[in-house]
C-alpha cells in the first residue's frame, strides 16, 4: 500500500479526533449509568447548592466539597440510587441515594445524608442537591 495514502489516513483520523467537541462536559462513568454534567448545570449546582451559596430554599453541600467529589457523588447516586419519574409531570428521572454520612444540609438547615440527582431524558444532569 502507498505510504502517502497511509500517512494521509492517519492525518485525517487525527484531525477528526481533534474536531470532536469535548468542552462543556464533565466526567462520565460507566455505560449503563452514564450521565452528562454540562458546565452550565455544574454552575447552577455551585451557585444554588454550594456551601457558601446565599440562595434561599435550597439544600447545601458540606464545605470543602470539590467538583471532582461532586461528580463522584452524582455518579454513585445514579449507579446505586433509587430511580423514579420526575415530579409534577416534568420529563426525566430522579435518583435518590443515602450516603449514610452527612453530605450537607437540608432546606431547613438540618443534616442531610441523601443526594437527589435530576436527570433529563437525554441523560444530562439538571441539578443535584442534598436533602
Image (cartoon, rainbow, N blue to C red):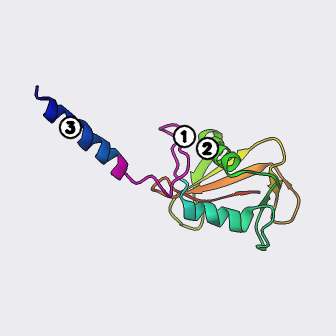
* Above or below, 6 relative to 73: above
> On the picture, is 58 further left or further right than 33?
right
Counting from the top left corner in percent of width and height, residue 114 is at 76, 49
Mark 1 neighbour class, 10 Å CA radius: few under 14, some 14 to 19, many 20 or more: some
Image quadrant of residue 100?
top right
Residue 9 got which mark? Answer: 3
The dominant secondary structure in magenta is: loop
Q: Which residues are magenta?
A: 18-36
Q: Position of residue 64 (x, y in %)?
A: 81, 52
Q: Is residue 37 left or right of residue 66?
A: left
The residue furthest top is: 1
Label 1 close to label 2 by CB (< 8 Å): yes
Mark 3 vs mark 1: give the one in front.
3
Is residue 27 within the magenta segment? yes
Reply yes or no: does residue 2 show up in magenta: no
Residue at the spot 49% in from the left edge and 52% down from the top edge: 123
Amino acid at each position: 500500500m502507498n505510504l502517502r495514502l497511509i500517512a494521509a489516513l492517519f492525518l485525517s483520523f487525527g484531525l477528526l479526533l481533534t474536531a470532536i467537541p469535548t468542552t462543556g462536559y464533565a466526567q462520565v462513568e460507566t455505560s449503563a449509568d452514564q450521565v452528562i454534567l454540562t458546565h452550565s448545570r455544574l454552575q447552577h449546582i455551585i451557585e444554588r447548592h454550594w456551601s457558601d451559596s446565599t440562595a434561599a430554599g435550597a439544600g447545601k453541600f458540606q464545605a470543602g466539597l470539590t467538583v471532582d467529589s461532586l461528580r463522584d457523588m452524582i455518579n454513585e447516586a445514579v449507579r446505586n440510587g433509587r430511580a423514579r419519574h420526575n415530579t409534577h409531570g416534568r420529563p426525566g428521572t430522579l435518583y435518590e441515594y443515602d450516603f449514610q454520612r452527612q453530605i450537607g444540609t437540608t432546606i431547613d438547615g438540618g443534616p442531610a445524608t441523601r443526594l437527589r440527582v435530576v436527570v433529563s431524558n437525554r441523560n444530562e444532569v439538571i441539578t443535584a442537591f442534598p436533602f
